[in-house]
Image (cartoon, rainbow, N blue to C red):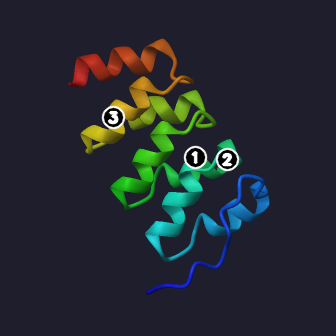
């Protein structure tokens, strides 16, 4: 079992989360992607993660920039696409693209 190098406290700094965004363990990246303090820049990076669950958590995070959500509505994974289209920060274009693609 991989030791978790970080306590994912609600007050974790965006700098700490950014440093963990490239961790080899996808569980750590997943936790970063769903954290309330993860910056839009870090979420943009994680939106290209190889792990579907990480991208799904990015699609759910309200801090994810609208342009990233538009990209994610074309993801290969349905849960990622749906999460991006239904994110409270999603622009209308993301919702329409999701309806057209699914």
Q: Which mark is residue 8?
A: none
Q: Is residue 73 among the parts visible in the rendering?
A: no
Residue under label 2, please give it.
41
Residue appearing at x 75%, y 64% in the figure: 16
Find the distance from the CA under tag 3 to the CA under tag 2.
20 Å
How many neighbours does mark 1 have within 10 angstroms: few (below 14), some (14-19), or many (20 or more)? some
Q: Label 3's element?
A: helix
Does residue 51 appear to the left or right of 13 in the view shown? left
Choose top left, top right, bottom left or bottom right for residue 85: top left
Question: Disc 1 versus disc 3: distance between alpha carbons?
Answer: 15 Å
Q: Quadrant of residue 53?
A: bottom left
- Label 2, residues with CA under 10 Å away: few <14, some 14-19, many ≥20: some
Q: Disc 2 vs disc 1: Cβ atoms closer than 8 Å?
A: yes
User: Which mark, residue 44?
Assistant: 1
Q: Name above or below for residue 83 compared with residue 6.
A: above
* Side (left or right) of 49 relative to 33: left
Residue nearer the viewer, 97 or 62: 62
Q: Percent from the top left, x then y, of residue 78? A: 25, 38
> Looking at this view, is 9 or 83 the one in front?
9
User: Whole-percent x and y of residue 44?
Assistant: 57, 46
């Amino acid at each position: 079992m991989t030791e978790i190098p970080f306590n994912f406290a609600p007050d974790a700094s965006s700098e700490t989360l950014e440093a963990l965004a490239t961790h080899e363990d996808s569980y750590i990246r997943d936790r970063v992607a769903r954290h309330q303090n993860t910056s839009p820049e870090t979420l943009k990076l994680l939106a290209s993660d190889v792990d579907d669950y990480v991208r799904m958590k990015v699609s759910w995070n309200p801090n994810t920039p609208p342009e990233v959500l538009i990209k994610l509505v074309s993801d290969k994974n349905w849960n990622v696409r749906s999460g991006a289209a239904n994110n409270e920060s999603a622009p209308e274009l993301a919702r329409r693209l999701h309806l057209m693609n699914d």
